[in-house]
């Protein structure tokens, strides 16, 4: 308890990440399609020879680089913190279709293989086992999409880790408003005449519509009011959001959201052996607590527990998954032998 209190009390500097790439030749996807060279980009922090390896997976549209912020890495990776880099080997890959890993915008456009979550996890497993020499993980954790991957990791490789920590997710098929959000994003892209079956020559206007729904579903009203407290500030914030949206690649974004279409860990929850703490926040409208999904499903996870973080002045809606000071005590709980 004292250790948890101390770890929750401060942010600290941590070592710079080391970047790398690993190429898997003739990678076979779930539908039988193959890619001659699948590149996986990744970031690591800590000692590669440490027996305490930790895998951290990012959300849709993100990158392993995003975990190197003060609100995430500054709360976890520093000296004396839950994932102290002096003790742990921390691996933060860019999933297929994201960051520096192989993706449609590299040149194949809409001819890039239609990857799914299982493909992404299988590739990450090969990165760990074949390239980084990791034989076992102390902890698998992830945010949003990475959280959904965490559930699947526990089912696909149940003996490969000691603990699992999905942050902002639900272990069921994506349906309801969550699925509608994804349908809207995909439709905004593919229904735009400028999309041209993926062979566009400039950023398409459908990216703006895709960003509309994504912003409203993943944001926090309280934090947005604090960030943009006046009409003029909100208008300026909107313009910045749209500028950022138009810098995205439409094929990459389409593939990223389509990859979740067959996600459904619910039938195999009993396969999970590792200790698991699922953490959601009460103001997350992507995974709203009123649906009661976690209360129902966690009963089927032998060593599982569900934590709901109450709405507060520090929660960030769906983005609470990256505010580590609000949940890092549960990392310590999972790592306790």
Image (cartoon, rainbow, N blue to C red):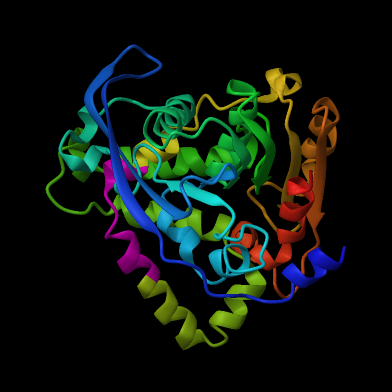
- The residue closer to the viewer here, 183 or 253, is 253
Query: Residue 161's x, y, as percent?
Result: 64, 33
What is the number of callouts on the image? 0
Where is the N terminus found, in terms of image quarters? bottom right
Q: Is residue 278 visible?
A: yes
Q: Quadrant of residue 312?
A: bottom right
Determine if the magenta segment contains residue 99: no
Where is the C terminus found, in terms of image quarters? top right
- The residue closer to the viewer here, 293 or 101, is 101
Answer with left or right where residue 52 lies relative to residue 91. right
Prevailing SS of the magenta stretch: helix
Answer with left or right where residue 336 lies relative to residue 158. right
Residue segment shown in magenta: 241-253
For the point 33% across and 53% down, the residue is: 19
Answer with left or right where residue 237 lies relative to residue 108. right
Q: Residue furthest front?
A: 49
- The residue closer to the viewer here, 113 or 102, is 102
Q: Is residue 191 visible?
A: no
For the point 53% across and 30% down, the residue is: 135
Q: Is residue 150 above or below residue 238?
A: above
Q: Is residue 141 above or below residue 125?
A: below
For the point 39% across and 28% down, the residue is: 130
Query: Residue 30's x, y, as percent?
Result: 41, 16
Q: Is residue 269 above or below residue 149?
A: above
Query: Residue 177's x, y, as percent?
Result: 62, 42
Query: Residue 84's x, y, as percent?
Result: 60, 61
Determine if the magenta segment contains residue 242: yes
Q: Residue furthest left?
A: 201
Q: Quadrant of residue 17?
A: bottom left
């Amino acid at each position: 308890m004292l250790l948890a209190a101390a770890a929750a009390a401060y942010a600290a500097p941590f070592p710079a990440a080391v970047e790398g790439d690993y190429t898997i030749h003739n990678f076979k996807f779930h539908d039988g399609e193959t890619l001659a060279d699948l590149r996986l980009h990744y970031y690591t922090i800590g000692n590669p020879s440490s027996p305490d390896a930790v895998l951290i997976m990012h959300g849709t549209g993100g990158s392993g680089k995003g975990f190197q912020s003060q609100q995430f890495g500054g709360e976890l990776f520093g000296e004396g913190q839950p994932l102290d880099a002096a003790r742990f080997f921390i691996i933060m890959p860019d999933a297929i279709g994201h960051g520096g890993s192989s993706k449609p915008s590299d040149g194949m456009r809409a001819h890039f293989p239609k990857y799914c979550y299982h493909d992404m996890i299988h590739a990450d497993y090969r990165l760990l086992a074949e390239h980084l020499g990791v034989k076992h993980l102390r902890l698998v954790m992830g945010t949003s999409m990475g959280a959904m991957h965490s559930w699947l990791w526990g089912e696909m490789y149940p003996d490969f880790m000691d603990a699992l920590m999905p942050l902002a997710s639900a272990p069921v098929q994506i349906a309801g408003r969550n699925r509608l959000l994804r349908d809207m994003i995909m439709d905004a892209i593919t229904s735009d005449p400028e999309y041209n079956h993926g062979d566009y020559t400039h950023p398409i206007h459908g990216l703006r519509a895709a960003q509309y729904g994504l912003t409203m579903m993943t944001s926090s009203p309280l934090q947005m009011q604090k960030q943009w407290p006046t009409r003029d500030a909100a208008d300026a914030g909107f313009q910045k959001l749209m500028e950022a949206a138009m810098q995205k690649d439409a094929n990459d974004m389409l593939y990223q959201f389509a990859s979740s279409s067959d996600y459904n860990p619910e039938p195999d929850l009993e396969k999970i052996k590792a200790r698991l703490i699922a953490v959601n926040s009460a103001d997350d409208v992507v995974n709203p607590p009123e649906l009661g999904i976690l209360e129902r499903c966690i009963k089927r996870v032998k060593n599982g527990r569900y934590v709901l973080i109450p709405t507060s002045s520090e929660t960030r809606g769906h983005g609470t998954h990256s505010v580590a000071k609000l949940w890092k005590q549960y990392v310590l709980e999972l790592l306790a032998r």
